[in-house]
Amino acid sequence: MAKLTILVATLAAVLLMVDASIYRTTVVIDEENRSQRCQGEMRAQDNLRHCMEYMMEQSRSRWSDQRGHFDMCCRQLESMSQECRCENLEEAMQMRREQFQRQRMSMSEAMQTARRLPTICRLQTRECSFRSPYAL
């Protein structure tokens, strides 16, 4: 009877490990699929060009006519899935980092503005949180 108990306990432990391994594999694959989908959305929206132009105009002058790029930026963000918006904004910011620095706009200021864009466009209620070292 003791041998049977040990055998059942061993089988249960093996099943738990196999189940955990399957879950981990699923998470990794889902993450890769999401990342590829977000990259595709980013390319489809011209690397969020209008959002970057809006932010460049904003850094140059608070009084310039930014409405055109702002409206187009909101449309670009709206066409993305919610789970990709923040990731794609952060990626676009990193791609344009040198350009922001040439315009003398600090990266922390630019990241703060980018973080708020989906909220300002009324697409989501929370600001983005970026992994970037330039985030405040």
Image: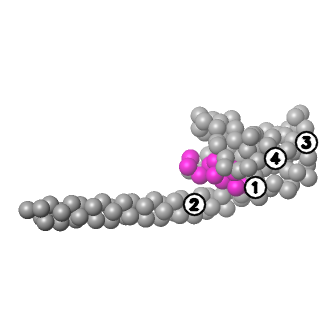
- Residue 130 appears left or right of 35: right
Upstream in sequence: badge 4 or badge 3: 3
Upstream in sequence: badge 4 or badge 1: 1
Q: Are marks 2 and 1 in contact (CB under 8 Å)?
A: no
**Start and end of the magenta stretch?**
82-92
Quadrant hosting residue 36: bottom right
Gap in angstroms between the C-alphas marked 1 and 3: 19 Å
Residue under pointer 2:
35
Q: Residues within 10 Å of mark 4 (few under 14, many from 20)?
A: many
Indicate whether 135 appears above or below 16.
Answer: above
- Residue 35 appears left or right of 74: left
Upstream in sequence: badge 2 or badge 1: 2
Which mark, residue 30? Answer: none
Q: At 60% from the left edge and 36% from the top edge, which residue is drawn?
A: 126
Residue under pointer 1:
94
Residue under pointer 4:
107
Residue under pointer 3:
60
Amino acid type at circle 4 is Met
Upstream in sequence: badge 4 or badge 2: 2
Gap in angstroms between the C-alphas marked 3 and 2: 33 Å
Q: At 38% from the left edge and 64% from the top edge, which residue is drawn?
A: 21
Gap in angstroms between the C-alphas marked 2 and 1: 16 Å
Q: Residues within 10 Å of mark 2 (few under 14, many from 20)?
A: some
Amino acid type at circle 1 is Gln
Upstream in sequence: badge 3 or badge 2: 2
Q: Mark 4 vs mark 2: give the one in front.
A: 4
Upstream in sequence: badge 1 or badge 3: 3
> Which quarter of the image is occupied by the N terminus?
bottom left
